[in-house]
Image (tube, grey):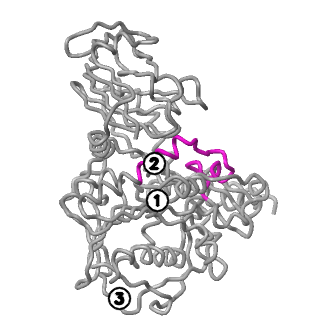
Amino acid sequence: MKHFFSILIAILFIGFIFTPPFLTLVKQDALISEFEKRQLAQLPEMKFNLPSLVKFPQQFEKYFNDHIGGRDQLISLHNTFNFRVLKKSPISSATVGEKDWLFFNADGELLDFMGLMQKDFATLEGYRYVLEDRRDWLAKFGVRYLFLPVPNKMMMYGEYLPLRVRQEKGVTIYDQFIDHMHKYSDFTDFLDLKAILLKAKEERQIYFRTDSHWNLDGSLVADQEIIHHLQQWFSQLQTLELSDLKRSEIYYRGDLAILMHIQGAIGEKASVLEVKDSCRNKLDRKLFGFINKNKKLADDARFLPEINGCKGKPLKALVIHDSFGIFLRPYLSEQFGQVIYMNYSNFTGMKEWIVQERPDVVIDQRVARNLPLALAQDQEIEKELVQEAFTRTEGACLHLDGDSAQSEIVNSHDLSVIKKSDGLLINASGADPYLVYSGGKCLRNGEMSVHISLTSPQETEMQFYYTTEEQQGFSSAFSRVLHIQKGINELFFRIPRPGFAGQIRLDPGKVAGEYILHELIIKNK
C-alpha cells in the first residue's frame, strides 16, 4: 500500500508539472484577456540579429506567462478563495461590499466618495463656462443641448460598502458640481438624477449588484427624466412607462465579477425590459464615413458612431455617452426618428458633425467619475463666443501694447525684452519665461475677458496667471493654459470669479525662442 501511494504521488506530481505545458501547446492563443481587459502578449518573432536575440528571452517570458495552460483556471480559483473565504477583493480596482455587492473603485471613484477630490471655485466655474458655452454655441445652429451626469454606483448603494469606507463618506465632485450650477449659473439644461434615482431605488433595484453600471430599470428612470425635460422644446415626444414594456429575467454576471475573475462564483438575476410594440431596428447600424479626430480610433470600425431610430417619427438626436449610455439606447431609439450614438468621442470631437448634420438635440451623458474629462474647456468654442462678446463690450480695464507692455513690467524671468514697432519682442532664454504686470483697474469680483495677440516661435502652451484676495501668490489653480501654434495667435478667454486682486503673470510659452506680445487687453463683463 505504501508503494502504491508513492507511485500515485509521483503520477500526480508529473501530471501537475506537465499538464500546463501540454495545455499551452494544444490550446489556441487568445488575443485579449476578458477579465483583465488587456491585450495579451503575442509569441515574439525570432530574428537572428543581436538586438532581437537580446530581447527575445524577456518577450517570450511575457508570452509564456500570459498563455500557460490552466492560467485562467488557477487565477479564478485563487480569486474565488479571496472573495468567498477571505471576503476581500483579489484586485485593487474593485471593492467587495456587504451582501456580495461589488464596487468599482478605480479612476478616483473611491477617493471621490470619501470627499478627497473636491474642486476649487475656479475649477467649478470652468465647468459652468463649458456648459453655458456649449448651449450658446449650439443655439447658433438651432440645436438644443442637455447634459446628463450619472451618479456613481457608490453614491446610490453606499450602504453596502464596507463600514470603514462608509464612515469616511464626504462631499463628491457630483454634489459640488450640482450645487455650484444651481447657485451661479443660468444653465438649467442638466438633470440631477441623484435624488430621482434614490427615490426609484425604494421600489426596485436600479444598479447591478455584480456590475459597475445601472441596470435597465435605472436607465428607464433616466430616460423618463430626459423626455420630460425635452418636452419643453419638443412636445411630440412621449415617455415610456412600465406598462409599455415587457419584463423577463436572465442570470447575469456583471463586469466587476468578470474583472475580478470570480464569475463562476457569483451572479444575479437581472431584468430585461423590452418595448412591447417596438419600432426601432433590433441592432444599431454603423455610421460609416465619420472621421474621428482621435487617430488611434480613426481606422477601426468598432469606434464608429452607430445609428438607430423609428421611421416616421420626427426629430434627430445625437447622444454622446460613455458605457452607461448603452443602457439608454433601447429606449431613446424608440422615441426619435433618428438617433446617432457616439461612445468613443467627447463633445469636442463631434463639433464638425454637429455643424454638418444639425440634429435637433444633443444629449451629453457622462458618469460622475468622468465629469472632469467631460467638462474640459474647449478653446475653440470659448474663443468664438468670447471674441463676439469682446467686440460688444466698451472700454478696457487693462490694455498693453508695444509701448506699455515694456514700461509696465513689474517682474520677469528667463527672458529679455525689446520694444519693436509691432509689439514687445520677448527673447526667452529658458523653458520658464514669464512677465508680471499689475492688475491696475481690474480689481473686481466679476468675470473678466482677456484678449492676447502673441507670436510664438513654436507650437507650445501659453499660461496666464492671476492673483485674487484668496490667492495672493501665483498658482496653477488660478491660471488658464491655452495651446498655441507657431506664428501669430489671437487668443480670447475668460478669467472666472472672483477676478483679479493684484497682479497677472504671462508665461508666453514653454520653449526658448523669440515671442512677440502684440497686445494684451482685459475687459470687465
The residues tagged by marks 1 and 3 sit, at their Cα atoms, a distance apart of: 27 Å
Please give the residue where the numbered disc 2 appears in the rendered image: 373
Element type where label 3 sits in the image: loop
Q: Check residue 32 in the rendering and tell me which mark sits there, or answer none.
A: none
Q: Does the magenta stretch include residue 123?
A: yes
Residue 15 seen by the camera? no
Q: Write the residue at 44% across / 11% down.
A: 413
The quadrant where residue 290 appears = bottom left
Mark nearer the N terminus (2 vs 3):
3
Residue kind at label 1, given as amino acid type: Arg
Q: Give the range drawn in magenta.
A: 104-131
Q: Is residue 503 magenta?
A: no
The quadrant where residue 300 appears = bottom left
Q: Check residue 366 in the rendering and tell me which mark sits there, or answer none.
A: 1
The residues tagged by marks 2 and 3 sit, at their Cα atoms, a distance apart of: 35 Å
Mark nearer the N terminus (2 vs 1):
1
Q: Please rate how many residues cluster around mark 2, counting C-alpha atoms within 10 Å: few if below 14, some from 14 to 19, many from 20.
A: few
Q: In this view, does 351 lie to the left or right of 2?
A: left
Q: Which residue lies furthest to the right in this view?
A: 2
For residue 266, above or below residue 32: below
Q: Write the residue at 33% across / 28% down.
A: 521
Please give the residue where the numbered disc 3 appears in the rendered image: 278
Residue kind at label 2, given as amino acid type: Leu
Q: Please rate how many residues cluster around mark 1, counting C-alpha atoms within 10 Å: few if below 14, some from 14 to 19, many from 20.
A: many
Q: Write the residue at 35% across / 82% down.
A: 237
Element type where label 1 sits in the image: strand
Q: Which of 414 and 254 is in front in this view?
A: 414
Callout 2–callout 1 Cβ contact below 8 Å = yes
Q: In which quarter of the image is the N terminus?
A: bottom right
Element type where label 2 sits in the image: helix
Q: Nearer the viewer, residue 88 or 481?
A: 481
